[in-house]
Image: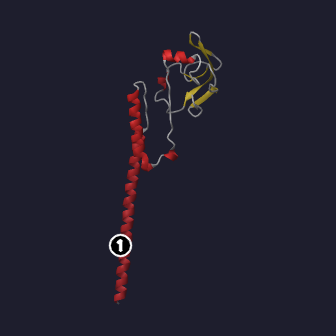
């Protein structure tokens, strides 16, 4: 758990910080309760809450008794090796760092990365807002095309006005 503060909504208690502390994401464990994780492994629940929106596509994937722990050090390591765990890693797209002209490239890089992750390990599932990025890219292209159309009409109007002024000046000179 590198920095869960932005990804977890704390409803009671606090986030775990030390060995054998856990944060209940699902289930009925109350703050202060001790949960038996294995024959000789216990964790004290120090908080309850949920993951932020969009971190897990479906909350049911967390299971009935999902716990967030700060690390797998100590007694948790062998337990996780024996039974497995679910690790969720997220990254936000910073709107100020995503430019309209680069959406196609960003979408392609995300698609390639998702494919590589999926091929590397069958248990890894990666997602990205590829459809949203494609829609934004399409909207940007439509807006650019409309702007070019309006700019072309403006340029034609300026040329027509210049021709009108030139013709009028020629008529004045001929009188």
Residue 41 drawn above or below residue 115: above
Residue 96 drawn above or below residue 171: above
Snapshot quadrant of residue 71 = top right
Image quadrant containing the N terminus: top right
- Name the residue at 38% across, 56% down: 146
Q: Is residue 10 left or right of residue 63?
A: right
Q: Residue furthest top?
A: 39
Q: Residues within 10 Å of mark 1 (few under 14, many from 20)?
A: few
- Name the residue at 34% across, 85% down: 171
Where residue 111 sits in the image (x, y, percent)? Answer: 39, 37
User: Which residue is more in the foreground, 86 or 35?
Assistant: 86
What colour scheme governs how the chains and residues are painted in the rendered image of this protein? secondary structure
Where residue 162 sits in the image (x, y, percent)? Answer: 38, 75
Image quadrant containing the C terminus: bottom left
- Name the residue at 42% across, 24% down: 123
Residue 164 drawn above or below residue 109: below
Tally the marks: 1
Residue 3 drawn above or below residue 96: above
Snapshot quadrant of residue 119 = top left
Where residue 173 sits in the image (x, y, percent)? Answer: 36, 87
User: Which residue is more in the foreground, 75 or 65?
Assistant: 75
- Name the residue at 38% across, 51% down: 141
Q: Is residue 72 left or right of residue 139?
A: right
Q: Is residue 98 left or right of residue 50?
A: left
Snapshot quadrant of residue 127 = top left
SS state under label 1: helix
Which residue is label 1 attached to? Answer: 160
Where residue 107 sits in the image (x, y, percent)? Answer: 41, 41
């Amino acid at each position: 758990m590198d920095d869960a503060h932005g990804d977890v909504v704390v409803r009671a208690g606090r986030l775990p910080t030390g060995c054998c502390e856990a944060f209940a994401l699902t289930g009925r464990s109350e703050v202060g309760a001790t949960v038996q994780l294995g024959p000789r492994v216990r964790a004290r629940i120090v908080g309850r809450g949920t993951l932020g929106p969009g971190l897990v596509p479906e909350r049911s994937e967390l299971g009935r008794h999902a716990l967030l722990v700060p690390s797998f050090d100590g007694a948790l390591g062998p337990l996780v090796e024996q039974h497995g765990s679910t690790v969720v890693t997220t990254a936000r797209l910073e709107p100020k760092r995503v430019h309209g002209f680069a959406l196609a490239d960003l979408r392609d890089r995300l698609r390639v990365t998702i494919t590589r992750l999926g091929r590397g390990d069958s248990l890894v599932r990666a997602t990205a807002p590829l459809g949203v990025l494609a829609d934004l890219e399409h909207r940007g292209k439509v807006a650019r095309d409309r702007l070019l159309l309006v700019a072309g009409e403006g340029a034609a109007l300026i040329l027509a006005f210049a021709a009108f002024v030139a013709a009028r000046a020629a008529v004045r000179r001929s009188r």
